[in-house]
Amino acid sequence: MTEDNAAPRPIANLITEAREGRLQLRIAPEDFVYIDRDCERFKMLITDLQREAQAISEVDKGQWGIGADARILTSAQTLVDRFRTKGKGSENSVHAVLEQHYRIVDDIQTLHREIRQRYEAADAVFAAKVKDLISRLPEQVTPIDPAVSQPGVGHPEVLAPQGTPS
C-alpha cells in the first residue's frame, strides 16, 4: 500500500527506540494481539476506501449525469473535475489523506509489534500467552464494515408526517 521512498514515517523515532530497547510499554498480552488485529482491519478498510476514491476519480464526465459532457455546461464540467481530483489527483485528495492515515496505523502496528517481540524474547510466559491468543484468532481478518448512511434516520424533521394536501 505505502511506498518506502515516500515521506518519513510519522512515528519512526518511537519504532527505532522500541527496536533498540529504549522504549517500554506496560500492556497485557491480549492488548498487543487485539491492537495488531485491529490495525490490520483498519488498514484493510482504508485500502477499500482508497479504491472507492480512485474509482470516483476515474468516472468519465458523461457518467455523472449532470451534463458534464456537454461543452456548454462549464459549471458541470468544473464540478466533475473537482470531484475527480478530490477522489485521487492532488496532495489533498481523499486518496492521499487516507494514505497518510494508513501510514500512521501501519506505524502504530509496527511500534506495538516491536515492543511485543521484546517482551516475548524476555518473558516465556508472556510469549506463550501471546502465541495462544494468536492461535485462537480467525485465520482471515474480519474487515471493518464502513458506516452505512440511512437517509432520514436520526432526522425527526425528515420522518415527520407531511400535512395532508388541501
Image: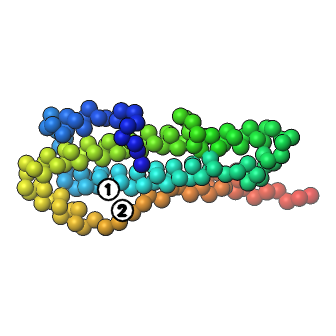
Picture layout, residue 68 above or below residue 38 = above
SS at mark 2 in the image: loop
Q: Is residue 151 left or right of residue 26?
A: right
Q: Which mark is residue 50?
A: none
* Dot 1: element: helix
- Examine the rendering and report whether any part of residue 156 can be seen: no
Q: Residue furthest front?
A: 5
Mark identifier at residue 141:
2
Residue 138, placed above or below residue 156 = below
Could you say which is closer to the camera, residue 6 or residue 97?
Answer: 6
Which residue is nearer to you in this view: 150 or 39?
39
Quadrant (top left, top right, bottom left, bottom right) of the C terminus: bottom right
- Which one is in front, 62 or 40? 62
Within-10-Å neighbours for mark 1: few <14, some 14–19, many 20+: some
Quick check: marks 2 and 1 in contact, CB under 8 Å? yes
Q: Image check: 17 left or right of 6?
A: left
Can you tell which quarter of the image residue 132 is in? bottom left
Q: Earlier in the sequence, mark 2 or mark 1?
A: 1
Residue visible at 25% across and 52% down in the picture: 31
Measured Cα–Cα span from mark 2 to mark 1: 7 Å
Picture mark count: 2
Q: Amino acid at mark 2?
A: Val
Q: Is residue 66 left or right of residue 146?
A: right
> Would residue 89 be seen by someone viewing this image from the given angle?
yes
Give coordinates of residue 107: x percent, y percent.
32, 42
The residue under the point 28% across, 65% down is: 137
